[in-house]
Image (cartoon, grey):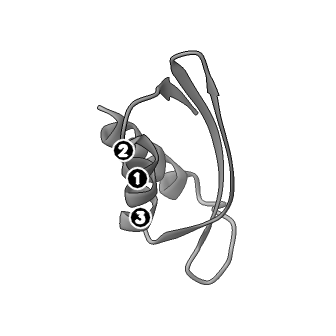
Amino acid sequence: MRARDRPGLLWRIGRAFGDCGLDVRAARVETLGAEAVDVFYVVDRAGRSLTDEAQRALVRDQVLAALR
């Protein structure tokens, strides 16, 4: 994910994951100039990867909404 870095950015993304019932297992967070370039490895509450495309789309939409 790539977004303009600003205060509270990681909190908003983390909250979106939590609202979707996900746990962040690992993250790689970097700043390149004014942009944040982050990668998140998430699992559901049972520790499983997200394999359902509809669920992945919902998570993507939630995170993108949090960035607006």
The residue depicted at 36 percent of the width and 35 percent of the height is 67
**Is 42 on the left-hand or right-hand side of 34?**
right
Q: Residues within 10 Å of mark 3 (few under 14, many from 20)?
A: some
Pointer 2 with pointer 1, Cβ within 8 A: yes
SS at badge 1: helix
**Is 68 on the left-hand or right-hand side of 41?**
left
The residue depicted at 68 percent of the width and 74 percent of the height is 48
Identity, as a three-letter code, of the amino acid under mark 3? Cys
**Residue designated by label 2:** 8
- Which of the pair 7/59 is nearer the observer? 7
Q: Choose mark 2 or mark 3, whichever is in front.
A: 2
Identity, as a three-letter code, of the amino acid under mark 1? Trp
Q: Is residue 35 above or below residue 58?
A: above
Where is residue 26, by image quadrant? Answer: bottom right
**Residue designated by label 1:** 11
Identity, as a three-letter code, of the amino acid under mark 2? Gly
Q: In this view, does 16 lie above or below 39?
A: below
Q: Reading the chain from its start, which is encountered first: label 2 or label 3? A: 2
**Residue designated by label 3:** 20
Q: Reading the chain from its start, which is encountered first: label 3 or label 1? A: 1
SS at badge 3: loop
Residue lying at the far bottom in this picture: please name it: 46
Q: Is residue 25 above or below residue 39?
A: below
Q: How many marks?
A: 3
Q: Choose mark 3 or mark 1, whichever is in front.
A: 1
Q: Residues within 10 Å of mark 2 (few under 14, many from 20)?
A: few
Q: Position of residue 32 (x, y in %)?
A: 63, 20
SS at badge 2: loop
Q: Residues within 10 Å of mark 1 (few under 14, many from 20)?
A: few
Q: Residue 59 carries which label?
A: none
Q: Where is residue 57 in the image (x, y as percent from the top left)?
A: 48, 46
